[in-house]
Amino acid sequence: MKTILIAKQNLEKTYSGACRSVHEEIKYFHSKGCEVHTISENANVADIESSGGIPHKSKRFFWQKKFRRRMQFSNEALKLAKKLKVDLLIGQGDLQQPDVHFIHNCVHLASEKVHGKPLAKDDEMYLTHTPIFQNHQFKHIVANSHLAKNELMSRFSIPEHDISVIYPAIDENQFRLLPIEERNAIRADLGVKSDELLVGLVTSGNFKKRGVDRFFEAISLLPKEVAEKTHFVFVGKDKLSPEYQAILDRSPYKDRVRQLPIINKVEGYFNALDIFVLPARIEEFGRVVAEAMACGAPVITTKWVGASELMKAESAEFVYDGESNQTLANLMDALLSDKALRKRVSLANQTSAKEVYESALEEKFDAVFGPYIV
Ligand SMILES: Nc1nc2c(ncn2[C@@H]2O[C@H](COP(=O)(O)OP(=O)(O)O[C@H]3O[C@H](CO)[C@@H](O)[C@H](O)[C@@H]3O)[C@@H](O)[C@H]2O)c(=O)[nH]1
Ligand SMILES: O=P(O)(O)OC[C@H]1O[C@](O)(CO)[C@@H](O)[C@@H]1O
């Protein structure tokens, strides 16, 4: 039996896309008969055990600066790997010398896209990620999109054969189109009347990265008759900054825009929407896009979102470059004004989302991990 150790500093957050990836990895290796251990500072122990993992808590060096703390975590993980005599050590961007690295964030590109400047050389994330890629401190990388793979190849000259793309998956039993009565009940609970429409942006947080400001600006640019029959919602753990609140306060439709709380059954939000919007400056994959597609939402997003790679044919017309808020407004208007178009794009998205169903993941993992677990 092979022993696997998966390291990630934080394994507590249920709304984090990277944590969800770790659960996919645990379930896969467990299903292959491996003994799967995890190490993290914080863990949702019950969840890890129910996925088939054996959780270990690393010491928390909370008094240390962030980067030093990351290095301590990395060392703790390496120590445990030695003790358990693991056959395969898997990192998620915060382990310095894994066998295989799942990369969730392109921190250098993100700094350029979100803040308009290179990542500072003393930034915690620069110090953590740069040596891994520059010094080739891995045997293989799993990137969560072609966008991420291309970035790693072009910035760090990593050879193409060292990187596989495996899109994060969606649980098709959770993220699916609900019966119309249930969808209508959720909409009614959200205060949407039968002749009104609902547009939403759902994310884990980091509103600037996800372009929440662009969403607000575009709402203001909608034709009055369209905006006044539509509700707009955004979901994420962050509080609006004063700058973003000011954008909203200037909007003629500010009373139609609301933040909704993070809830367990997030698929209810996707099912309630007439359009899902993610005008992100960068999103390496963006599970929320795939989840919204599987729940039948037409999606508007940018070419800087990895999951836009799933959007085909007519749906691909709703992938834009992210720069112009007028373009975003026009795309929203086109969908809000045309029920038949919404229906076509919804059906196309539901079909495309099948590419990332959890049931299709085993084959993709086999291709990468087969040689490690035979
Ligand atoms: N339960 C619950 N989950 C939520 C809620 N809001 C968001 N989430 C969940 O939080 C997850 C967010 O995942 P991503 O959209 O992928 O973003 P991320 O947390 O920043 O994840 C990072 O890693 C991912 C996996 O590689 C990447 O897909 C992503 O681009 C990013 O780099 C999704 O599964 C989404 O359903 C909520 O209200 N309730
Ligand atoms: O959203 P989370 O769960 O904090 O994880 C984000 C990911 O970003 C990193 O902090 C940097 O890539 C990783 O360590 C982690 O896997």
Image: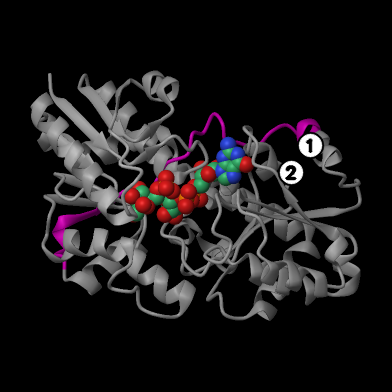
Residue 151 in sight from this viewpoint: yes
Contact (Cβ within 8 Å) of mark 2 with mark 1: yes
Q: Quadrant of the N terminus?
A: top left
Q: Give the class, few, some or many, for how many residues have Cα within 10 Å of label 1's Cα (few <14, many ≥20).
A: some
Q: Which numbered dot is residue 186?
A: 1
Give the main secondary structure, helix, strand or loop, of the magenta stretch.
Answer: loop
Q: Is residue 182 magenta?
A: yes
Q: Is residue 40 left or right of residue 351?
A: left
Residue pictured at 11% horizontal, 59% vertical: 136
State the residue in front, 335 or 198. Answer: 198
Task: Quadrant for residue 358, please give it.
Answer: top left
Expressed as whole percent of the image width and height from the top left, the position of residue 266 reads 63, 38
Tell me the amino acid under the disc marked 1. Ile
Expressed as whole percent of the image width and height from the top left, the position of residue 177 reads 65, 37
Identify the magenta region. 158-183
Residue 294 in sight from this viewpoint: no
Residue pictured at 34% horizontal, 63% vertical: 106
Q: Secondary structure at mark 1?
A: helix
- Label 2 and label 1: CA atoms lie apart by 6 Å
Expressed as whole percent of the image width and height from the top left, the position of residue 229 reads 89, 60
Q: Quadrant of the C terminus?
A: top left
Queried on whether the Cβ of the residue with tag 1 lies below 8 angstroms from ligand 1, the answer reads: no
Tell me the amino acid under the disc marked 2. Ala
Q: Which numbered dot is residue 272?
A: 2
State the residue in front, 210 or 327. Answer: 210
Q: Give the class, few, some or many, for how many residues have Cα within 10 Å of label 2's Cα (few <14, many ≥20).
A: many
Say above or below: 73 vs 39: below
Q: Is residue 95 left or right of residue 266?
A: left
Residue pictured at 47% horizontal, 43% vertical: 16
Q: Is residue 136 magenta?
A: no
Say above or below: 371 vs 132: above
Q: Is residue 270 left or right of residue 206?
A: right
